[in-house]
Amino acid sequence: MQSTAHAFRDNVDRALVDDNLQQSLAILKVGFAERRRQAVERLPEFDALRDRGRDIKDHALAHLDFYLERFEARVTDLGGRVHWAPTAEDARAVILDICRQAGARTVTKSKSMIAEEIALNEHLEANGIEPVETDLGEYIIQLRREPPSHIIAPAVHLTKDQVAETFLEHHRKLGFDQRLTERSDLVAEARQVLRRRFHEADVGITGANFLVAETGSSMLVTNEGNADLTNTLPRVHVVVASIEKVIPTLEDAATLLRVLARSATGQEWSTYTTFNTGPRRAGDLDGPEQYHVVLLDNGRSRVLGTNMQEMLRCIRCGACMNHCPVYGAIGGHAYGWVYPGPIGAVLTPQLVGVDEAGDLPNASTFCGRCESVCPVRIPLPGLMRHWREREFERHLTPAAVRQGLALWAFLARRPRLYRLVTGIANRVLALLGRAEGRYAWLPLAGGWTKHRDFPAPQRGGTFHAQWKARGGARQ
Amino acid sequence: MSGRDQILGAIRRSLKRGALHGEARAAVERRLREHPVNIVPARTSAPPGDRVRLFEHWATFNQATVARVAAADVPGAVSDYLASSNLPAQAVMAPDPALDRYDWNSRPMLQLRRGLPVDADRVAITGALAGIAETGTLVLTSGPDHPASLNLLPETHVVILREADVVGPLEEVFTRLRARYGEGVMPRTVITVTGPSRTGDIEQQLELGAHGPRRLHILLVQD
């Protein structure tokens, strides 16, 4: 998809006044985080599993070439095909080619962030092939022609009434002309509509949560069962996955799965956790005749061996965004590209460039909750700090910020002058703000006062002065 | 240069080495061959009787229903479940020889068809390779005796699971898969199922029956 990360500030302004979005975010903040907390409490080994999960991913990344080759050999042994796609364009071309050779008119899709990353739907549509999203949330936003706002709950920004309106608009022509008010009726209607689409589809496209080198399996985790219908009913199954998804063994998958579902939705285990291995076997009554795996690099191999490598451990659970105060205030669309939240703030500058997405790593309070919940212990604040440094080095920071920081650095290196200047500023601000107790506008602080008042300093002087007066220095 | 060479080359350049060889390669080969077990939650080490109870606990926790029956009572338990759920006494059943051991003729009113499901089928009956006590999960392997669409298309799925097939952790399933299919070999699809299909995609509220079954009923067979 086309990035709007460069317009982050405008996106944020819009998000903060979007009532429907704010209503949805209020539920999100309590729901996911609380369910995760309960699931973690039920499993005493959770933190030890996180350590092991981190180690497994680090091991896989350090031997990535070996495990990818082994994975390919296994898939080929079983009659499947592996396609290597260095760029998004390569991946789109391979998938279109597979669809054309299958004579496909419609393809069903199970939610895949990689497919979003390579803008697959737009490419298929432009070439006369209709992609049908089958994950309920993804289906809803496809009808509305919106991007996902969360990596595991793509329609989390919408209310039930908005969904009802969308269904009425798009399902009327299929004979569903009632405006629904119950969630269960909305789910039932989507089930009926999509069941037909499952049967019509010539090709099924899924992502993968993991690729297992030992067996050549691609793994999928869903709650709806849509991925299983997508990989079982059509004649052709295409898996599109990025290269860092490969792990060594089934045992390694077990460890990562134990932290994935709990971190994502607070479930003990996702409803459907599936290992797909190759095409239909002799004697099988169903399953695809062809099985393809498209391995996407799209810049990831460059991250290996750098101090940003840890971002490649990500297993896309969404816990970092569920626990992020910034995501909780602005939602996912404001981030402007495929991956929102803290992991988006780290991945997006890597994948679309720091010129485009340099604002995202600044959208953090550095509270550290993302790192504290990450199932594979990615040091997200540290990685964001790295991008801030890159942005600063490349002089992408606004001139006012740079000059302000230079002035502050000048004063901070001269303690006596610093105390003199801050002491004067403190007294002036306290005097001028005496009547109101706060400022609605201050020169040089427009960014702050645009959204809230700046409190006038209280009696007692600067922090330094108060610290000294209370005897803090003697401790 | 092929895409394959480009990607593998870029990975090796970033890792500052060539293709793995010698002792480094032998070590990863060994790790794959030995597939060491990582951390297994202590809750899975219950003795067999407790293991079945643990399975029941987690399956129910995840909105499945569970009934424990003797082998001779399986057809009756299926009929009774369908009647109590207001479903017709009809089902499509997996062509799995393991299900022939139950005396289906004891319930002549129960109409069973073996094979693939069609849209009109409201109930599917299948066996399972195993049940995982750790999470109340069923392990369903595809094959000539068990088409995967049986697990997905009908609204109600009745699974017949022998208590002896209830294992502790997921890792024991891998042991069984390797014993049955060979090292590093898997059937076309292995679906692990925990409760009925569900979605939280509308206002984050749980709704059952998104695309797969709305009801998952497990008959735990004592033998």
Image: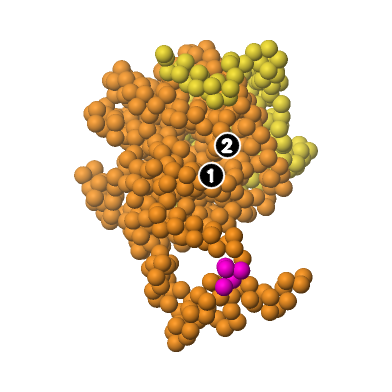
The secondary structure that most of the magenta stretch takes on is helix
Question: Within 10 Å of the Cα at label 2, are there few (<14), some (14-19), or many (20+) other Cα atoms?
Answer: few
**Drawing shade for chain B:** yellow
Mark 1 or mark 2: whose residue is earlier in sequence:
2
Outermost residue toward the left?
A173
Q: Position of residue A404 (x, y in %)?
A: 46, 60
Q: Nearer the viewer, residue A348 or A238?
A: A348
Q: Which residue is mark 1?
A: A386
Q: Is residue A418 magenta?
A: yes
Q: Residue at x 50, y 75 (%)?
A: A425
Task: Name the residue nearer the viewer: A182 or A263.
Answer: A263
Residue drawn at x 62%, y 43% is A377
Quarter of the picture containing the N terminus of chain A is top left
In the picture of the structure, the residue carrying the numbered disc 2 is A307
Q: Secondary structure at mark 2?
A: loop
Q: Colour of chain A?
A: orange
Percent of width and height locating residue B39: 72, 36
Expressed as whole percent of the image width and height from the top left, the position of residue A104 reads: 29, 24
The magenta stretch spans which residues?
Answer: A416-420
Q: State the image quarter where residue A129 is shown.
A: top left
Q: Find out whether residue A117 is within the magenta segment.
A: no
Side of A470 relative to A234 (left or right) = right
